Amino acid sequence: MREEKTCPDCAESVLAQARVCRFCGYRFASAPVTSQMHWLRRPIDTRSLPEFLLDWGMALSEGEDVAFFGMCELDQSDGFLLVTTLRAAFFVPRGSRKLLEWPLEQIRDVEIRGRGRRACIHLGGDPGEVTLRRFASRTTLFEVADALAASRAARP
């Protein structure tokens, strides 16, 4: 025998799998979709940021605070930017390769260039010049630029 349910609007019996009552047109609430392939999902990473950075071969020093950690693009590479009170570092996700690590005292210039979606942060320093772009939002771009500029201004 097939499973049935009762329509709350007209009290007729309809198939349990029905989304709409065939008698009155009542729409049943959608059942939550359950995936048969839940085993394909990666487990949620519950590590703290310092633990995560240790896996990438980078430890935070005593008293070093994180000002920003998030995704962006360095020149032509997508990855993660870390700005702390002492340094700026950029990692590529595959292989956790570090493309950049500058002590903040080596950063001479922090400049926002462009407008709208093309806005970017241009950094100039002793090791050279790089461009950071494609932040999650324009607000994030300004926060990162402010964090880099503030740390630079705090130096004697």
Image (cartoon, rainbow, N blue to C red):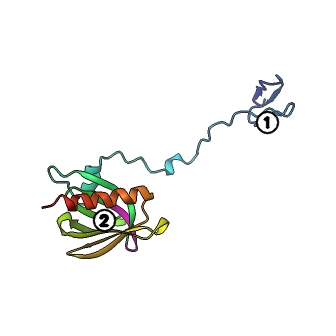
* Three-letter code, disc 1: Val
What is the number of the mark on residue 90? Answer: 2
- Majority SS type along the magenta span: strand
| Residue 72 spot, x, y in % from top left | 39, 63
Of badges 1 and 2, nearer the viewer stands: 2
Residue 106 as seen in the image, left or right of residue 143: left
Q: Which of the pair 114/71 is nearer the observer?
A: 114
Q: Which residue lies at the image location 14% right of the left edge and 50% below the top edge?
A: 62
Helix, strand, or loop for circle 1? loop
Q: Which residue lies at the image location 22% right of the left edge and 67% below the top edge?
A: 102
* Three-letter code, disc 2: Phe
Earlier in the chain: of badge 1 and badge 2, it is: 1
Q: Which of the pair 156/14 is nearer the observer?
A: 156
Residue pointed to by mark 1: 20
Q: Is residue 40 visible?
A: yes
| Residue 93 spot, x, y in % from top left | 37, 63
Q: Is residue 61 magenta?
A: no
Q: How crowded is the residue under tag 1: few (<14 C-alpha within 10 Å), some, or many (20+)?
A: some
Q: Which residue lies at the image location 27% right of the left edge and 73% below the top edge?
A: 124
* Residue closest to the far right: 23
Q: Quadrant of residue 79?
A: bottom left
Residue 12 as seen in the image, left or right of residue 16: right
Relative to 10, is 145 above or below? Answer: below
Residues rendered magenta in the picture: 75-81
